[in-house]
Amino acid sequence: MLVGRTAECARLADLVDGARTGHSAALVVRGEAGIGKTSLLGYAESVARDLTRLHTQGIETERELPYVGLADLFRPVTDHLDRIPERQAAALTGALALGPAVAQDRFAVAAGTLSLLGAISESGPVLVVVDDTQWLDPYSLDALAFATRRLGREGVVALFATRDTDETASRLAPVESLSLHGLDAGAARELVAEEAGEPLPPHDVQWLLSEARGNPLALVELPALIAHGGHRPDTGAPLPIGDILARTFHSAITRLPDPTRDAMLLLAVLGPRPLAGTERVLSAHELTYADLEPAERAGLMTVEGGAYIFRHPLVRSGVYHGATAVRRWRAHRTVARALQGARAPAALERYAWHLSESGADPDEEVAAALTKAASGGPASLTFPLAARLYAHAARFTPDDEGKALRLLAAARAAQAAGSLDEAADLLDRALDHAAYERTRLDLRQLRCYVDIQRGRPARAREQLRSAVDEARRVDPALAAVMLGGITLTELAIGDLTAARATSAESMQLADAFGDVSAALPVRLLHALVELLGGNAEDGRALLHELEKPLAVPDLSFPYPVSGVGGLCYLATEELDQGHALLDRAVHAARSSSTVGLLAHLLGTLSVVEFWRGEWNASLAHADESVRLGEDTGRVIEVCRALAAQARTEAVLGREADCRSHEAQCRSLAAAAELPMDAARARGALGLLELGLGRYEDAATHLEEVRAFSLANGRGDGLYLSWAADLAEAYVHLHRTDEAYEVLRVLDHEAGRGRRPITAAAAARCRGMLEPAYAERHMDRALAELGDIQAPFERGRTDFACGELLRRLGRRSEARRRLQRALATFDRLGAAGWAGRAAAELHAAGGDRIDSGPTPLDGLTPQELRVALAVGRGVTNHEAAEQLFLSVKTVEFHLGNIYRKLDGVHRRAQLVRLLSESARP
């Protein structure tokens, strides 16, 4: 047990005990330098000797090397890679430099990290320890963050130690944190007495307690350093303990002989995972290991495993930052020469980084060599590594245009890796150097696509619009693609009037494409805007013309083509076609671990499933889209999915969840300038109030949606739906003239081509406004729906008709309609609507046969996702791969599902239940 850390040690021991019983957990240990984070992690390792222990440490000089931390962590367990899904294994093998790299974004590696941890845990519990996380390379950190957020029943405990002022804890959120503070006076005295070789004079103890302020490293190291010829640091005003220790270490370092300091600097530059040729690096400076002995005697270095290592990372940092720039440059040049052509792990990345830190002048020969290495293709490089090598090549490029082109290549690789912020920074730097018009256009175009992905469509539209006129002169095909990008931003914002005009411009230039398939994104976007607000028949004809290329999911287009196609089918109200298209695309995105695109597709699929009455699936997919959108930094996908969640929760009567997700969506949408998603979420709130019979509140919310929709050239549709709900609220409020005004919008929308759900809603609302002809209008509404899978619309129609028939005194006919509506609402789980239908049925003299909640209502979102995956007939391993979970977690959720669902104990029974639940 560590002195003064009884409670903290007990907490870590509990986590380790939990792993032994199959419970996973993660914890971030935070605190200043020297506060005892490493010791606490070491304690956890000491009580976990029966666990598989994986350890890595962030190194300040290696933070720029992609996946170097992950490679160090998994080096002892690479024999498990053949037990994880093939695509994930390939991505992870490439990232860890154990085999050929593959063209995958960083989230394929993250998914592989989770799967590998799960595979290792099948042999027993696992402890993952990451020290100095503030210096871990961002790619390794993101992969581990992705994995830890999805840990469940694997028996994996992940511990991270980081500086208190670092943002690492926020990147690992929502992982819990444990903040370490200084030891109390009693514990501090105990530690000093335990560590001191002989009792210290009382005045030295008092000075030490005052200066150290409970910091364990200071309490242990300050006396030792002073005893080795140092002196008490003259700190003046109180300083952070790290600064006090750094000054004290620096004082001890400066007293060492010059050859010792030079040798220490070379080791500091090499890092803790040095080359096999370390001795050769030292000899290049006419140094040997013997020159390090004075540092060992001074307590600054120690020998471990036959190699010299620094006593503490602060010593390494003090050696490196305490050296002059010229000495650091010379050390980096020496190491770079040793790495050139070496076959050591990450040798290429290290060579490039050391070269860039060597103070060398721009050199086209060096830049060309780095560019050649970076452009080796996916068979030799991962996207993150290619991005870094191109960026280093740009650093050595003498001319501005060449520098801009190499930064553009780096940005493309960073975007492909899913590192959007890095890509944006590289593009901004490149724009400062680009000399030629075409290069500037390419840079601006990619910058705007990155902004769209980051949830900043307003900025992207402004930047693309300013570049289009130049593009027309240089390359009409490029201008058409840019105009397509502007159309996409305007659709995201909700400005359909502008989108129609822009799309028409892009179609005028579409003939500039030599390859018809290359124009697919532009033509598909044009079909969508025509369907939403223009010539619906032409839009439908164009969509059907594009059905063949749409049938094959293609993840390489600059726009999310399958997602746009899904929106097109929503606009035509061809739900089966939209569901089939999106389902294929989702499967392809899962198979390739294209997580960012998957977040987009799931959000659109959730909307389709809402209208098909597949509300459990809709909720599960919207929830997954939110999580993946958060993981990938795609704010726009988070907003879209939150709005979809809120709408489904509204009809289910989950008032608290609906209001919470509406508020989250509104807040994010305001920050990202996404007013359409805010309007969609507000529409969900209106539908919630309507279902609960609060008609004034419903009308207030829905009037806001109407104002937004009409101001932006939109009418009413399945993606942004409001008119039928507002008309119904007005009917109940006896605001008949206003209800007829809204009905005219519905009639107009229904008249623009074959739109059966909108036509049915218009007929239903007319029936509510004209009670004498209610039954005729309601029967027409049901006829419009035909055999379309839209059960909620059927239920609403039966309910509205039964309600009116009861008020007309036709109680027997009303009971028949109301019983049918109630059965539909009960099956769907539409609690508020079922309550209203039951009340009307009782008033009509009927008795409710309570069917209770639907079988899947008691499942959590994660259990729903597992159930839906298993319901498609996949194995547990396949479900784990598709859902980015471990096999053990899938098995755990499956066990919970069987316990919660009466009469379901086998996969075949679950498949049958899900099939029955999906029927209209």
Image: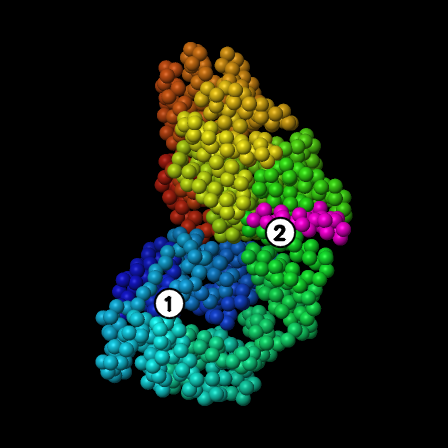
Q: Residue 434: x and y, percent?
A: 68, 61
Residue at 49% from the left image edge and 80% from the top image edge = 323
* Label 1 environment density (alpha carbons within 10 Å; few <14, some 14–19, many ≥20): many
Number of the label disc, if any, that sits on residue 448: 2
Q: Is residue 88 above or below residue 840?
A: below
Q: Is residue 544 above or below residue 247?
A: above
Quarter-of-image position of residue 757: top right
Q: Under tag 1, what secondary structure?
A: loop
- Viewer-proximal residue among 903 and 260: 260
Q: Mark 1 touching mark 2, by CB under 8 A?
A: no
**Quarter of the image that includes the N terminus:** bottom left
Q: Is residue 676 above or below residue 361?
A: above
Residue at 40% from the left image edge and 78% from the top image edge = 247
Residue at 46% from the left image edge and 38% from the top image edge = 646
The type of colouring in the image is rainbow
Left or right, 814 with reference to 453: left
Query: Does the segment drawn in magenta span residue 848?
Result: no
* Label 2 environment density (alpha carbons within 10 Å; few <14, some 14–19, many ≥20): many
Residue 779 visible here = no
Q: Residue 154: x and y, percent?
A: 40, 55
Q: Residue 887: x and y, percent?
A: 44, 51
Q: Under tag 2, what secondary structure?
A: helix
Q: Which residues are magenta?
A: 456-482
The overriding secondary structure of the stretch rendered in magenta is helix
- Viewer-proximal residue among 336 and 199: 199
Q: Is residue 318 above or below residue 492?
A: below
Residue at 33% from the left image edge and 75% from the top image edge = 218
Name which of mark 1 and mark 2 comes first in the sequence. 1
Residue identified by numbered label 1: 32
Quarter-of-image position of residue 182: bottom left
Residue 171 visible here = yes
